[in-house]
Image (cartoon, rainbow, N blue to C red):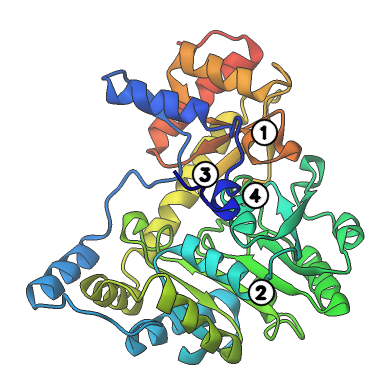
Amino acid sequence: MPQPSRRISGIIPSGKDGWEVHFAAWQRRQAGEDILMLSAGDHDFDTPEETVDACIRHLREGRHHYTPLPGFPRLRQAMAAISTRCTGVETSEAEVIATPGGQLALFAALQGVLDPGDHGIVVAPYYATYPGTFRAAGARFTEVEARPEHGFQPDLDAIAAAVEPDTRIILINSPNNPTGAVYSRDSLEGLAEICRRHDLWLVSDEVYWSLTGTAKHLSPRALPGMAERTLVVNSMSKSHGMTGWRIGWLTGPADHIRLMISLNLVTTYGLADFVSRAAIDALEGDFGLAKIATTYDSRRRAFLNAIAAFPELVVRGSQGGIYAMLDITAATPDCEAFAWQLLEKEKIAVMPGASFGDAARGHIRVSLCQTEDRLADAARRIGAMVTGRQTD
């Protein structure tokens, strides 16, 4: 048969991707084993009832038709209002385009600023799809590791040194998946200065903006000279409990967003009508927003309080988002081997830190998508494995 394109063949390179532990645990759980899944970042609760009821109502009212390519005007207005809250910059409907989930917003952002052969910089540890999204754009990228001993804050000197003549963007994620680090004002101001100096785009993935615990979320879009060169990726998946609904958006300069509509023409051709209208209701009504934020703040504190009983376990980042990052080198530097052992001995699935870049080697990522009691119990069992202590 004819050969596939080099573009799609190269999106995901062959070899291990670090998710083997998760998939093995998932298969065993499907087969009936009692596996505690702390490897994936999907809520253990359903979408808020108000959102579900709104969707059913719109579906029964016959909202089954095509929608405008950038999203309904009212949907974009509601997204703009959330963007104003998220970024601290007054945002208009013209500065927002609706997409099927945050991943499509990220895909659109990179397609919109990178030509084949261009270069970008990715701050690692990073969300797992970032490398493939660069490859889908035909672009090169350099990973610049944020060091664990610095709380996974970006290494500004290393980022500045990584800039090449054809560098077009820097891609960041704060609050960060997988580390839970919330980038500081100093880090973001340093990144902004690099972008202004080299005339770069900054793509800022802020899907966890509402889940910061006691930390304060700052969007680089709010810094001087950055609104014109920042593209913010956002989503309702985490903030509004709507992972499977696939509703996201991209915020940026109005002239650039206007061009992005052409990409929707040849990719998504708009969103589902009844889902869009339910999303409007959820955004305008703040359905689930405060409760979900409070839930994860409580879960994070419960897990970290239980971990505190084991001083051999060092917590890195873990300020926001829905994950905690634990240094388990007191037991072994091989985080993948530790994750497999944890699955076999304790029936707990976590992600090896190395799945997200070299800086996270020696760590495990723990999803907080379980109840406080189960998380506290998992913390005790993980701590016992690291220290060799016995648990009741």
Q: Earlier in the sequence, mark 3 or mark 2?
A: 2
Where is residue 213 shown, x and y percent of the image? 55, 56
| Residue highlighted by disc 3 | 300
Looking at the image, residue 107 lies above or below residue 71: above
Q: Is residue 365 shown left or right of residue 238?
A: right
* Disc assigned to residue 113: 2
Q: CA distance from mark 4 to mark 3?
A: 20 Å
- Please tell me which residue is depicted at 41% across the width and 51% down the height of the picture: 295
Q: Secondary structure at mark 1?
A: helix
Rendered-image quadrant of the N terminus:
top left
Q: Residues within 10 Å of mark 3 (few under 14, many from 20)?
A: many
Closer to the camera: disc 1 or disc 2? 2
Q: CA distance from mark 4 to mark 1?
A: 11 Å
Q: Which quadrant holds residue 384?
A: top right
Q: CA distance from mark 4 to mark 2?
A: 20 Å
| Residue highlighted by disc 4 | 126
Where is residue 150 shown, x and y percent of the image? 81, 46
Front position in the image: 375 or 13: 13
